[in-house]
């Protein structure tokens, strides 16, 4: 375990912590005793933690597996979090809205029409920010968040299983051009 901790320090990674059950794995022995361990961790760089300060990792319970599924929740607050890539501070410069129903970045999306709510953007933001935010590409599918667990037959996440995921994702369906000239690949 010390070598693992030394590696985390060398890579400058931090454990996100968690909310939920303390242990992520349970093994029932033949004699009735149980082995419980926290096998999984979510790690991030300090820069990532600064960018997503409201990120939370949840350990969920499972009745069908001896391993707990995990959910990483990224709640991005419009005026408090750093989410605008074109600004030197990465934060919104417009004055904070007094409308309590609009506080998250997800509140800016018109789900029915699958695009940003341009009227709301114009009401909330300075013109240059409304234009910039309105130009951020969204997936036309607006996929729902979902829990994905890819495991091997021995219930471990390995380099090989990650390679299999990468191969499965290698079939690209669509590419969207970003304002900086890069491409965002949709799978």
Image (cartoon, rainbow, N blue to C red):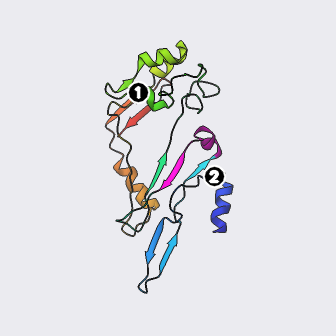
Residue at the spot of label 1:
109
Q: Which of pointers 1 and 2 lies earlier in the amino acid sequence?
A: 2
Q: Secondary structure at mark 2?
A: strand
Quadrant of image for the N terminus: bottom right
Q: On the rendered structure, is 140 left or right of 51?
A: left
- Say the numbered circle drawn on residue 130: none
Q: For residue 52: magenta?
A: yes
Label 1, label 2: how many angstroms apart (C-alpha)?
A: 33 Å
Position of 34 relative to 153 (above/below): below
Position of 136 relative to 173 (above/below): above
Q: For residue 60: magenta?
A: no
Q: Residues within 10 Å of mark 1 (few under 14, many from 20)?
A: some
Residue at the spot of label 2:
13
Q: How many marks?
A: 2
Pick whichever, 21 or 86, lies toward us. 21
Q: Are marks 1 and 2 in contact (CB under 8 Å)?
A: no
Instruction: Give me the residue at 49% from left, 32% from top.
Output: 104
Q: Residues within 10 Å of mark 2 (few under 14, many from 20)?
A: some
Which stretch appears magenta?
46-59
Q: Position of residue 130 (x, y in %)?
A: 50, 17
Q: Secondary structure at mark 1?
A: strand
Residue at the far top in the pictured view:
127
Instruction: Give me the residue at 33% from left, 30% from top.
Output: 140
Instruction: Give me the residue at 55% from left, 44% from top.
Output: 55
Instruction: Give me the residue at 51% from left, 58% from top.
Output: 20
Pick whichever, 173 or 55, lies toward us. 55
């Amino acid at each position: 375990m010390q070598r693992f901790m030394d590696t985390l320090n060398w890579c400058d990674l931090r454990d996100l912590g968690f909310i939920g059950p303390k242990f992520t794995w349970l093994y029932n022995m033949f004699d009735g005793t149980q082995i419980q361990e926290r096998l999984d961790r979510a790690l991030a760089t300090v820069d990532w933690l600064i960018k997503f300060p409201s990120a939370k990792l949840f350990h969920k319970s499972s009745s069908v597996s001896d391993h707990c599924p995990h959910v990483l929740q990224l709640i991005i607050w419009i005026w408090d979090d750093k989410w605008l890539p074109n600004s030197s501070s990465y934060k919104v410069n417009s004055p904070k809205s007094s409308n309590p129903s609009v506080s998250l970045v997800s509140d800016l999306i018109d789900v029915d029409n699958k695009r940003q709510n341009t009227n709301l953007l114009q009401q909330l933001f300075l013109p240059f920010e409304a234009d910039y935010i309105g130009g951020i590409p969204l997936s036309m599918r607006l996929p729902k968040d979902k829990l994905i667990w890819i495991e091997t037959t021995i219930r471990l996440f390995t380099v090989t299983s990650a390679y299999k995921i990468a191969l499965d994702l290698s079939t690209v369906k669509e590419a969207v051009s970003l304002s900086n000239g890069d491409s965002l690949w949709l799978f």
